[in-house]
Amino acid sequence: MQVVEAKGFQIPIIGLGTWALRGRDCARLVEQAIRIGYRHVDTAQMYDNEAAVGEGVRASGLRGEVMVTTKVQPERLAPHDLERSVKESLARLRLDVIDLLLIHWPNPRVPLSETLGAMAKMKRDGYVKQIGVSNFTVTLLAEANKVSLEPLVCNQIECHPFLDQDKVIAACRTAGMAVVAYSPIARGGAKGDKLLEQIGKIHGKSAAQVSLRWLTQQGIAVIPRTSKVERLSENFALFDFELSDAEMREIAGLARRDGRIVDWSWSPKWD
Ligand SMILES: NC(=O)c1ccc[n+]([C@@H]2O[C@H](COP(=O)([O-])OP(=O)(O)OC[C@H]3O[C@@H](n4cnc5c(N)ncnc54)[C@H](OP(=O)(O)O)[C@@H]3O)[C@@H](O)[C@H]2O)c1
């Protein structure tokens, strides 16, 4: 398994996304993914599936090899609440430690220094191994890296061929942070795209695989979600082909101004 290195930490380049997966189905998919070779699983307090994810990880018998990420809800970023919520996450996961803890969305009502201070404390106290952020803009990344007492290893952001994220990716690289791409197959939208299908045909791959390969070939980690066991293998088979420079550029040309899929309008506004 290839990894993305950030500040001495290694993030397996393919992970399993679990948003909307629940209960026994979720546990079974997580276990199966790990058996296939996935070494990175992404959950969040908001997904209401931490218990199932933990169950799947334990059932695989390979807990020690798997990096589990969870994310703190934006309403729980005040220090005391964050600490309580992390302990609750660990209890639901029933794992020894959270490998990577992220701020799920920024919350302007809680000073970043306080949240990051609490996350650093959770790391020092052994509840989490590494910390990072998600959905952070260029400006927020600069502030976070300035005030954080511990290294921030990644920014998890929406990233796929239909969205231009060049600026925030560049900011992550300057800060030495890994980029983890969520919705990396555009919630299934890669399938059916003419260009991705066409390029896929040349390599004997699906459009979804081309979308994932386009990201990983740029050193971006991906966390595709599927509810179908057969697609776990498809989304994992990314290392037996390579996109040419011309293909990489053509795919980048798919980016649109309105290419964002995940709605930000619900998130707390900055005053
Ligand atoms: N930090 C954040 O704010 C944030 C936001 C959104 C998501 N995430 C994380 O990122 C993960 C992935 O993002 P996502 O769930 O939004 O979208 P995604 O992984 O881009 O797409 C998932 C959708 O694509 C379909 N799919 C999966 N593999 C496929 C394939 N090979 N061919 C065709 N269709 C395929 C799935 O359907 P089937 O189930 O039918 O296969 C599902 O409907 C989430 O699960 C979550 O863990 C984080």
Image (spheres, rainbow, N blue to C red):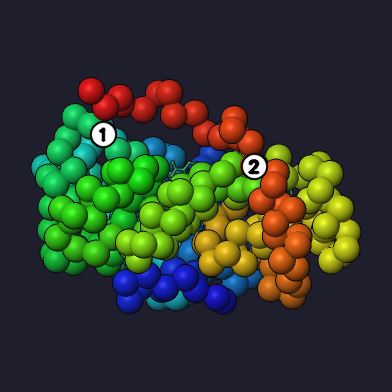
Separation of disc 2 and disc 1 at Cα?
28 Å
Image height of 190 relative to 216, above or below: above
- Residue closest to the eye, 161 or 89: 161
- Give the residue at mark 1: 107
Which label is found at residue 255?
2
Q: Quadrant of ligand 1?
A: top right
Q: Is residue 246 left or right of residue 49?
A: right
- Residue closest to the eye, 34 or 130: 130
Q: Check the picture and name the quadrant holding the N terminus.
A: bottom right
Q: Check the picture and name the quadrant holding the C terminus.
A: top left
Q: Is residue 109 left or right of residue 102?
A: left
Image height of 178 relative to 92, above or below: below
- Tell me the residue at 44%/40% (across/down): 47
Residue 240 at what x, y percent from top left?
74, 75
Neighbor class of circle 2 (other Cα within 10 Å; few <14, some 14-19, many 20+) is: some
Neighbor class of circle 1 (other Cα within 10 Å; few <14, some 14-19, many 20+) is: many
Query: Would you identify the image quadrant in which residue 257 lies?
Result: top right
Is the CB atom of the residue marked by disc 2 within 8 angstroms of ligand 1's nearest atom? no
